[in-house]
Amino acid sequence: MAEKPRILLVEDEDNIAIAIEVLLGRAGYDLVRVSRGDQALPNIRAQQPNLVVLDVTLPGCSGYEVCQRLRSDPSLSHIPVLMMSARVSQAEQRKGLAMGADAFLTKPFAMDDLKGLVARLIEGGPHES
């Protein structure tokens, strides 16, 4: 059997992280979670996930910083990034996409929307940088 696609979830709110872990685990993904922005890049390097699900507001460093650093690292820049934020402004979304996110999801979101985006980003394969 093929290996499960691996997702690194960077989310500091336990209730949101648990809901995402349960949903994506049931959908057949292998999920690893960290709760701080400054833990994200070392874990991305170690895990080489198929997707990073990244909250914007994190302790340690912001999701924007994590995404920008990931995109500037040639060994990691191919990994798709799904950013999430409770801030709903168009400016926030544009900033996330400008920093290199492949998609942006506003919290609270429908779990079906999350599942659909995750599947699309993982099955879309490597992105050209």
Image: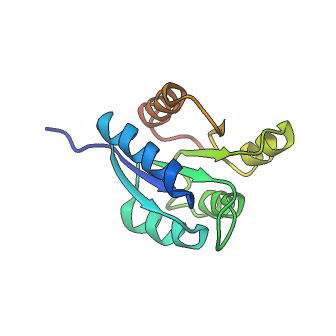
Figure coloring = rainbow
Q: Residue at x 84, y 39 (%)?
A: 89
In the displayed orientation, state which residue is furthest to the front. Answer: 15
Pick the residue in front: 7 or 18.
Answer: 18
Q: Position of residue 53 (x, y in %)?
A: 53, 48
Q: Residue at x 63, y 56 (%)?
A: 71
Pick the residue in front: 19 or 45.
Answer: 19
Q: Position of residue 73 (x, y in %)?
A: 58, 64
Q: Quadrant of residue 46?
A: bottom left
Quarter containing the N terminus:
top left
Residue 9 versus residue 45 in the image, above or below: above
Q: Residue at x 64, y 57 (%)?
A: 67
In the displayed orientation, state which residue is furthest to the left. Answer: 1
Residue 12 versus residue 126 in the image, above or below: below
Judged left or right of residue 102, residue 15 is left
Judged left or right of residue 38, residue 32 is left
Residue 4 versus residue 43 in the image, above or below: above
